[in-house]
């Protein structure tokens, strides 16, 4: 099967959607499917990543929140028929709109990664104004893939007409080495993800003052909130115990996970919560905001996983939960969460449903790899 995957950004850009798309595409390519990622960057380029052809089209508008590539839209309008199926990602990015252009009849699958609102005051104001365009993508899609039941409920709240076409496929987890036991010396806390204000990393930094010198915070990722967070750490006198790593590769992230005694996600909005899932899969005690997506992850992980859901606005509760997590130590058993192989298999079944093409056995897809 020849699959065109439309994404606002792609590796080496880092974020939850970017990670989802990269893992999915690499898995699809490994089964033998012919996968092309259609994305946008400052300059035009064509490269191969994980066996996936990545076509990057130059940006027409390079604004951080409203990036648009008219060359990408033109490619989708003129070349969509070259693919057996198009799979567009992210309601909150304009790239997905390009998959609806032209009169092509290529089946479309849409994974919205939907939060139900914008994450800045301006984006929240524009969100209902954008909805008619968002509805165009939803209505054009043969299937709408949500990563949690919580995301599905938000989608159906705002787009009830897609009820018969929504499926839930939870994100996968990456296999991580299990290192059971309690850490000695400094206890590492890890926050990982794009540094946006809604991720509420500032709440974790504020908690560092109360946690004291036995704790160190590793912040992995980059984004517009980084300067504010660095200033906050300095103002609170904890900058010596808060390390901003910026964007890191997979090996460096694995190293941060290996050192972590606790993983914390204080995010106010998530469609899934990949940081939490990867931590639980590695047996790391985790503290997370009590949002619907994290509650659903807790149910998926089961009672064997050490996961405490708290309100990050309650500093005392956050501090208490982090201390309890650090004292608990790592588990010798991974949480029973879906893998990326599970995600790939379920997604290929969706492609089969919208195209009418049977799913070929693993390793015997289009291209014969």
Image (spheres, rainbow, N blue to C red):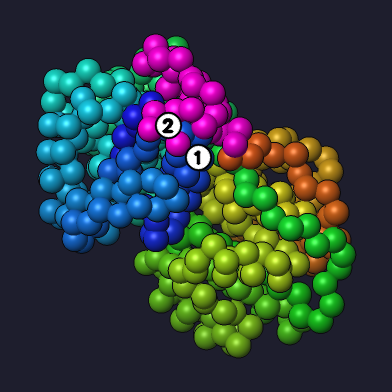
Q: Position of residue 285 (x, y in %)?
A: 76, 57
Tag 2 residue: 368
The answer to if 350 sits in the magenta stretch is: yes
The answer to if 292 sits in the magenta stretch is: no
Q: In which quarter of the image is the C terminus?
A: top left
Badge 1 crowding class, 10 Å Cα cut-off, few under 14, some 14 to 19, many 20 or more, is: many
- Examine the rendered structure and indicate whether residue 155 appears above or below residue 10: above
Task: State if disc 1 and disc 2 touch (CB < 8 Å).
Answer: no
- Examine the rendered structure and indicate whether residue 354 appears above or below residue 207: above
- Label 1 element class: helix
- Examine the rendered structure and indicate whether residue 224 appears above or below residue 239: above
Question: Could you tell whether 331 is left or right of 133 in the image?
Answer: right
Q: In which quarter of the image is the N terminus?
A: top left
Q: Where is residue 325 in the image (x, y as percent from the top left)?
A: 79, 61
Instruction: Locate residue 228: give its quadrant.
Output: bottom left
Viewer-nearest residue: 337 or 197: 337
Seen at 31% across and 20% down, the residue is 107
C-alpha distance separating marks 2 and 1: 11 Å
Seen at 16% across and 38% down, the residue is 75
Q: Which portion, as a residue range, is magenta?
A: 341-369
Q: Can residue 121 be seen in this view?
A: no
- Label 2 element class: loop
Front: mark 2 or 1:
2
Viewer-nearest residue: 205 or 180: 180
Seen at 78% across and 48% down, the residue is 334
Furthest residue in direction front, as rendered: 368
Tag 1 residue: 30
């Amino acid at each position: 099967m020849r699959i065109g995957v439309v994404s606002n950004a792609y590796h080496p850009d880092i974020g939850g959607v970017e990670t989802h798309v990269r893992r999915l595409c690499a898995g699809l390519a490994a089964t033998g499917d012919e996968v092309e990622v259609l994305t946008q960057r400052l300059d035009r380029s064509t490269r191969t990543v994980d066996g996936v052809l990545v076509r990057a089209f130059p940006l027409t508008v390079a604004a951080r929140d409203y990036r648009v590539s008219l060359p990408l839209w033109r490619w989708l309008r003129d070349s969509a028929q070259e693919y057996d199926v198009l799979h567009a990602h992210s309601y909150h990015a304009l790239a997905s709109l390009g998959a609806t252009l032209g009169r092509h009849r290529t089946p479309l699958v849409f994974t919205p990664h939907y939060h139900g609102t914008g994450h800045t005051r301006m984006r929240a104001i524009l969100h209902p104004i954008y909805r008619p365009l968002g509805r165009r993508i939803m209505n054009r899609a043969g299937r709408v893939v949500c990563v949690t039941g919580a995301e599905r409920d938000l989608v159906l709240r705002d787009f009830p007409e897609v009820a018969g076409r929504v499926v839930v496929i939870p994100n996968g987890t990456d296999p991580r080495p299990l290192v059971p036991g309690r850490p000695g010396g400094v206890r590492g806390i890890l926050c990982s993800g794009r540094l946006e204000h809604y991720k509420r990393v500032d709440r974790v930094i504020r908690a560092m003052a109360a946690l004291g010198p036995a704790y160190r915070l590793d912040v992995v990722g980059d984004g517009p909130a980084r300067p504010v967070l660095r200033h906050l750490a300095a103002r609170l006198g904890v900058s010596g115990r808060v390390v901003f790593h910026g964007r890191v590769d997979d090996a460096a992230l694995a190293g941060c996970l290996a050192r972590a005694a606790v993983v914390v996600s204080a995010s106010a909005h998530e469609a899934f919560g990949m940081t939490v899932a990867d931590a639980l899969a590695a047996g790391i005690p985790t503290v997370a905001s009590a949002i619907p997506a994290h509650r659903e992850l807790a149910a998926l992980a089961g009672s064997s996983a050490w996961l405490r859901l708290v309100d990050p606005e309650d500093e005392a509760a956050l501090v208490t939960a982090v201390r309890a997590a650090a004292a608990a130590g790592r588990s010798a058993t991974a949480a029973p969460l879906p893998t990326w192989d599970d995600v790939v298999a379920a997604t290929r079944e969706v492609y089969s449903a919208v195209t009418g093409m049977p799913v070929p056995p693993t390793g015997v897809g289009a291209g014969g790899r």
